[in-house]
Amino acid sequence: MTEFRDPATGARVWQVTGGPAINHPSYFLQSSFFPGGREMFFTSYRTGEPQLFSISLQSGETRQLTGGTPIHPFSPSLHPGGDSIVVTRGGGLYAVDLKTLAERTIFESAGAEFGECSISRDGEWLVAAYKSGAACGLVSGRFDGGGWHAIPFPRTVIHPQFHPLEPEWIEFAGDPAPRMHRVRRDGSGLECLYHHGNDEFIVHETFLGGTGDLVFTVWPRALCRMDWNTRHIATIAEYNAWHIAPDRAGRRVLCDTNHPDEGLQIIDAGAPAGAGARRQLCLSEASSQGTQWKKSRYALAEDFAAARHSLSWMENAADTVYGPQWTHPHPSWSFEEDKVAFASDRTGVTQVYVVEVC
């Protein structure tokens, strides 16, 4: 590992990985750190395909956690029990035991493709986005493998998440618009939380820590908060916050930025509506690719045609309209919230970085 000072803020930064292969943390919706902040996990293509690795932030010792059929590169999620990581691979969800590296099949569906997964805070329930032929939706069930069922949805589904206080509720994104939806874990109560058109570019919605409210970006102009019960929307900051990660208390929102790139920022979510005081944490110096981020609307058919490819599900890493995803910083907090992990291809190849939060 290499330590240096950020040229803009002076913060301590560590380049955690190196070499000619792409390495990146888990998605911005999940922490890539183990509790204690001395180790973290990441996805690496060093074997030729995406696999899961862990690394000591003290010694630099690296351990390969998965092998064989490649995992979905942005699926790894640490179970709250701390002894296993859940990944998706093809049409299955698997728990990787961190001591033995034995894999347990949680749920499989022949012919399906699973994307990002999420675990309820009590560790009992899982949810994942799926696609099977022309069918889309969610699958949900218990971590022990029981009670799994599909929840169909007529459009592409991404970013499913459990409500932090009411785990019977799942929030998810319907791509492209309208974006924000919720459904009960048993498949009942499906509803759109906010009706909007293709010209209002809402992205990266997540829960505002333990408050139970939602926070989301109206790209590229504002960071907003939605009351889970009343659906009232308030502006936290008029700013080009991009991928967002609230702290556990819901008082701060970590984000990266693009067009213009002002590095990683921490925004005060408790400030009066519209104030949104912020401070720069560090530069990311990531290339942050994707042609659609220069616009303020979702991609249309002609955008994909111009890029000479079709819509890639789950924001495929090889996308050129919304990605490649590995070129985006996707910052996330450590459990102690004294460190932040992010990705950057500043050296020409995406690597994992950690910055100290002071």
Image (cartoon, grey):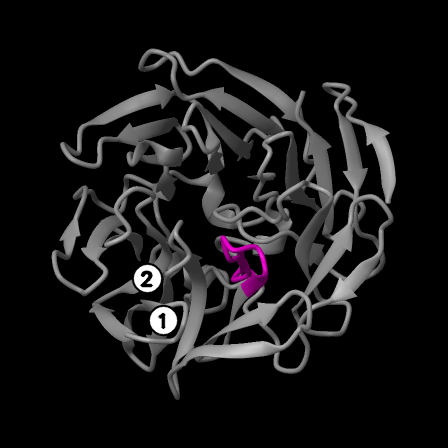
Q: Earlier in the sequence, mark 1 or mark 2?
A: 1
Q: Residue at x 39, y 11 (%)?
A: 275
* Residue 99 point in image, percent of width and height: 68, 67
Could you tell me if residue 218 is visible in this image?
A: no
The range drawn in magenta is: 74-85
Q: Which residue, given by chain and number where applicable, does mark 1 sit on? A: 130
How much space separates mark 1 and mark 2, taking CA atoms? Answer: 7 Å
**Quadrant of residue 187 in the image?**
bottom left
* Residue 195 point in image, percent of width and height: 16, 44
Q: Residues within 10 Å of mark 1 (few under 14, many from 20)?
A: many
Q: Nearer the viewer, residue 284 or 57?
A: 57
Q: Which residue, given by chain and number where applicable, does mark 2 sit on? A: 157
Residue type at mark 1 is Tyr
Magenta segment's dominant SS is loop
Q: Determine the secondary structure under disc 1.
A: strand
Could you tell me if residue 248 is visible in this image?
A: yes
Q: Which of 152 and 63 is in front in this view?
A: 63
